[in-house]
Image (tube, rainbow, N blue to C red):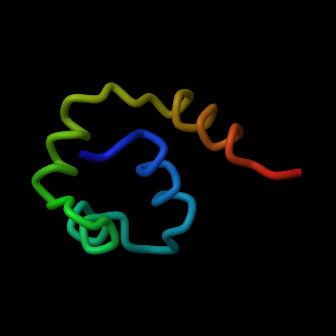
Amino acid sequence: MITKLQYVEFLISTVATYTGTHLAEHLDGVSHDAITDFLQSEKLTARHLWELVLSLRSF
């Protein structure tokens, strides 16, 4: 299982490779199929992702 927070942290920390396979390689027990299922089931808008990113910022 993958969470929105894990996905956002992946996007923030990844420089160039944004594939489900690449993310799955960095999460224990998560397959690229689980990543695909997550992205298909979650309705993540750019606005929603940005709000999640802002909540992770440290000042």
Measuring 37% from the left and 41% from the top, which residue is drawn there?
Answer: 3
Task: Give the residue displayed 28% in from the left and 71% down from the top.
Answer: 22
Quarter location, residue 24: bottom left
Work out which residue is located at the far front of the displayed protein and give it: 29
Image position of 43 with respect to 50: above or below: above
Image quadrant where residue 13 sits: bottom right
Total labels: the figure holds 0
Relative image position of residue 56 (x, y in whole percent): 68, 46
Residue 41 point in image, percent of width and height: 21, 29
Q: Residue lying furthest left in this view?
A: 33
* Rendered residue at 48%/44% (across/down): 5
53 left or right of 4?
right
Above or below 53: residue 43: above
Residue 20 coordinates in the image, percent (x, y): 24, 60
Say above or below: 35 vs 40: below
Q: Residue furthest right?
A: 59
Q: Residue at x 81, y 52 (%)?
A: 58
Q: Is residue 49 left or right of residue 1?
A: right
* Left or right, residue 13 beside residue 44: right
| Residue closer to the observer: 5 or 13 | 5
Side of 57 where 15 appears, left or right: left
The image shows residue 49 at horizontal and vertical percentages of 53, 37
Identify the image quadrant of the N terminus.
top left
> Where 10 sits versus 2, above or below?
below
